[in-house]
Amino acid sequence: MSEVIVEKHEGYAVLLMSNKKKRNALDSELSKALINKAKELSTDNSIRAVVLTGVDNIFCAGADLDEFSAALTKDALGHYKNREVDVKVFDIVKIIGKPVIAAVNGYALGGGFGLACSAHIVVSSPTCKFGMPELSLGIFPYVIFPYVIEAIGRRQATSLALTRKIIDAEEAKKIGVVYEIADNPLEKAMVIAKSIASLSPAVLKLSMNAINNDSEDSINSKYLSLLRIVNFASEDLKIGIDAFKKKIKPEWRGK
Ligand code: COA
């Protein structure tokens, strides 16, 4: 069972992603719950900062690969319909519209890496691992790529996507994903959230407008969504996911 647990503290909230059997993978239930909680928090005036984290010493293992497998039989219109949840979950920081601090407490892979990159501040434990293994599965990280580019620049983002390198917290800090490494990232993130919540609410709102005042996307997200639908029609994505499940090397067919 996957769910989002919300803990409210004075001035800030903690959002806990929980999908224990699948390393907190973003299945549609968890994604929908995240979007709904984000909407609720956006209009809750008692909350001025949000901490995002995962249960069980893992931040998030990315998209749910079982749902990916099931989705392979969908037609293009089905994928287009799915976009509402699949794509929007990576907009939760924008939806919340308040400072979001990611407390990364374990693997942040694929979509988990995307969520970390979309947060305003990332606190990581020294043992966390970050990366985009998607291409090994036969798919490009289309939806998160704009957020990764925004966080670390196009060259670093491209290198990590193509090499699928899994980096540790130190390296993630060096390239700008991580702001601070702490033995207890949740505790540290809560201290930061509390300090932000103590700021003038009016000036904090102006500050968020200033922070979010970016011009046009440097990358066309709509085009990436289209490519993603095409990728879902490929045989190689099925082969990649099957290989992950069976823990074997994929034999690509180029289709
Ligand atoms: N979607 C669905 N199930 C997932 C998952 C995902 N993204 N990530 C892990 N799981 C499941 C595994 O299939 C396994 O299920 P099982 O117990 O039924 O066999 C269970 O979670 C535990 O995973 P396992 O790989 O055995 O745990 P681990 O601690 O050895 O490794 C990870 C953890 C996160 C490194 C590893 O699970 C992983 O690489 N996951 C995929 C990450 C990924 O490619 N994300 C991008 C998706 S587009």
Image: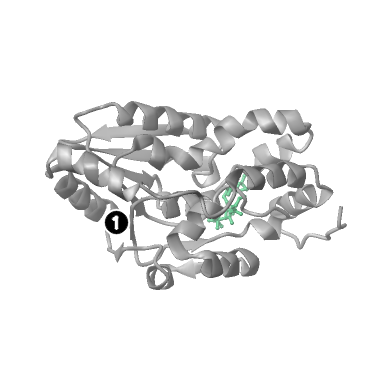
Q: Is residue 169 above or below residue 46?
A: below
Q: Is residue 79 above or below residue 242?
A: above
> Seen in the image, is 106 located left or right of residue 238?
left
Q: Crowding at label 1, few (<14), some or many (≥20) Cα neighbours within 10 Å?
A: many
Rendered location of residue 112, percent (x, y): 49, 50
Residue linked to disc 1: 185
Q: Is residue 36 visible?
A: yes
Q: For residue 7, what is the image quadrant?
A: top left
Rendered location of residue 210, percent (x, y): 29, 48
Q: Secondary structure at mark 1?
A: helix
Q: For residue 206, what is the image quadrant?
A: top left
Q: Amino acid at mark 1?
A: Pro
Task: Name the foreground residue: 247 vs 241.
Answer: 241
At horizontal 16% and vertical 42% (from top left) the residue drawn is 203
Q: Ligand 1: does it lie within 8 Å of the C-beta at label 1? A: no
At horizontal 62% and vertical 50% (from top left) the residue drawn is 142
Task: Name the foreground residue: 203 vs 180.
Answer: 203
At horizontal 43% and vertical 59% (from top left) the residue drawn is 151
